[in-house]
């Protein structure tokens, strides 16, 4: 097994499911549905990570790096987006 940088597939799946968790948190009104949907998204994140390790595509360190980088990128975008929107909105 050779060293490889964190997988783009892994990073995209983490960002997608993190985005879905964020949408569930912000948009879903029924509290009874939130926890099962959070659980499903988290299981999918860890399932993708585990499958990459089991298939021998990546080491554990690669998958942890991909998850960390993806979460950091998502949080940065979530923090910066309102600031950007505020700056580009025309003054009324």
Image: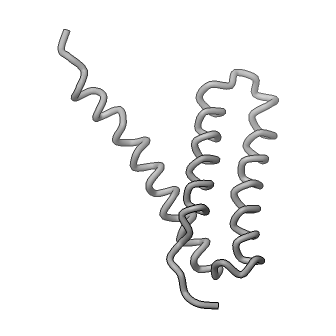
Residue 90 at x, y percent in the picture: 20, 16
Give the residue displayed 61% in from the left and 63% down from the top: 10
Residue reaching furthest to the bottom: 1
Question: Which image quadrant: the N terminus?
Answer: bottom right
- Residue 22, picture quadrant: top right
Q: Is residue 51 left or right of residue 27?
A: right
- Give the position of the C terminus as an image quadrant: top left
Between 56 and 86, the one nearer to me in the picture: 56
- The colour scheme applied to this rendered structure is one colour
Dividing the picture into quadrants, the one containing residue 20 is top right
Residue 38's place in the image compared with 45, above or below, is: above
The residue that appears at 57% across and 76% down in the rendered structure is 62
Task: Look at 57% across and 64% down and name the residue there.
Answer: 67
Instruction: Please determine whether, in this image, residue 37 is positioned above or below residue 59.
Output: above
Q: Position of residue 23 (x, y in %)?
A: 60, 33
Identity of the residue drawn at 48% across and 63% down: 69
Seen as rendered, the residue at the extreme top is 92
């Amino acid at each position: 097994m050779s060293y490889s940088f964190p997988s783009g597939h892994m990073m995209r799946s983490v960002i997608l499911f993190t985005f879905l968790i964020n949408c569930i948190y912000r948009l879903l009104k029924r509290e009874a549905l939130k926890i099962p949907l959070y659980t499903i998204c988290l299981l999918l994140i860890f399932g993708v990570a585990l499958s990459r390790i089991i298939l021998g595509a990546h080491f554990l360190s690669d998958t942890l790096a991909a998850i960390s980088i993806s979460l950091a990128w998502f949080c940065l975008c979530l923090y910066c987006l309102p600031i950007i929107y505020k700056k580009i909105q025309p003054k009324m």
